[in-house]
Amino acid sequence: MSFLFHIGRYILFVKRVFARPLKPRIFFKKVITEIDTLGINSVGIVFVISLFMGAVITLQLAYNIDMPFIPRYAIGLGSRDSIILEFSSTIVSLILAGKVGSHIASEIGTMRVTEQIDVLDVMGINSASFLVLPKVVALIFINPVLVVLSMGIGIFGGWIAGSFTGIVPGADYIYGIQYAFVPFYIFYSLIKSVVFAFLIATISGYWGYYTKGGSLEVGRSSTTAVVVSSVQILLFNLILTQLLLA
């Protein structure tokens, strides 16, 4: 029953979030601020993780398909598809669910326990829309940018690993990432990144918004937001893959 309760309250919460913003000018400024806070500040961790994971994916593929009848460019092809289809969209979103999701839940949860949200409600402001909608819009806008950035960095990391270890010549790797390229794969990953951004922002906002108690409960809400967001990302990853690639 608790599961159904949270689903129902989450749906009503999302409906409140997407009400018309109070003042478009203020809303726009908050969106720009959230893009910087949630997205630009995440570029560093996306860069580091994508670079090393691209290198690891390339090396693992090279070691596992080290057979004379498999061309070396297949390593570049496999790395490209792994990074574009799954790593850059899903894994990066899971990382952002931990970093960004916990930030959103703790920020809004702190405002709830310190009664700042109650003040907004008393003033007649739709607090759910005022606090959460800019974060949703900002994350939906910036997450695809981070995913595309991750794709390029991951493929570059694979090239560095293959070239400097000598396990796959640079020319073969570049030929592999160009071979039989399907542009829809990038579109597929961008669709997933938008859906995942929506889930991270709304789920984290939901758990933060309905926090009760003190600082200890804020921490619990933050942890719950990360866990629930991660599970939903994995679930919708399966659903979207079945719908878009089947």
Image (cartoon, helix red, strand yellow):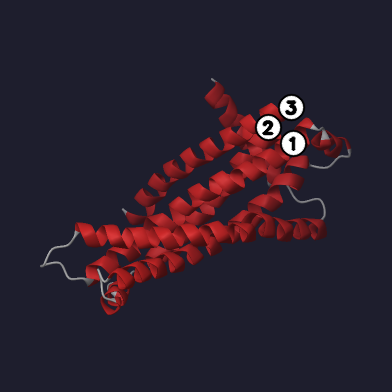
Q: Give the percent coordinates (x, y) of residue 178.
A: 32, 75
Q: Tell me how many marks there are.
A: 3
| Residue 199 seen in the current view | no
Q: Is 61 placed left or right of 13 in the picture? A: left
Of callouts 1 and 3, the N-terminal one:
1
Q: Residue at x 57, y 61 (%)?
A: 43
Q: Secondary structure at mark 1?
A: helix
Q: Quadrant of the N terminus?
A: top right
Q: Which label belongs to residue 214?
A: 3
Q: Can you identify the residue that label 1 sits on? A: 110
In whole angstroms, how far apart are the C-alphas of marks 2 and 1? 6 Å
Is residue 230 shown left or right of residue 33? Answer: left
Position of 233 relative to 37 (above/below): above
Q: Amino acid at mark 3?
A: Gly
Query: Residue visible at 26% across and 59% down?
Result: 61
Q: Residues within 10 Å of mark 2 (few under 14, many from 20)?
A: many
Q: Residue furthest top?
A: 1
Whether label 3 touches label 2, CB < 8 Å: yes
Q: Label for residue 155?
A: none
Horizontal and vertical percent for residue 209? 70, 35
* Label 3 neighbour load within 10 Å: few <14, some 14-19, many 20+: few
**Residue furthest out toward the bottom:** 171
* Whether residue 168 is situated above or below residue 32 in the rendered picture: below
Instruction: Judge from the rendering whether residue 118 lies leftward or rightward of residue 75; answer left or right.
Output: right
Answer above or below: position of 114 versus 66.
above
- Spot the residue most to the right: 123
Q: Nearer the viewer, residue 226 or 9?
A: 226
- Does 171 appear above or below 64? below
Q: Is the C-beta separation of discs 2 and 1 under 8 Å?
A: yes
Question: Amino acid under label 1?
Answer: Thr
Q: Residue at x 60, y 48 (%)?
A: 100
Q: Which residue has dot 2 on it?
A: 218
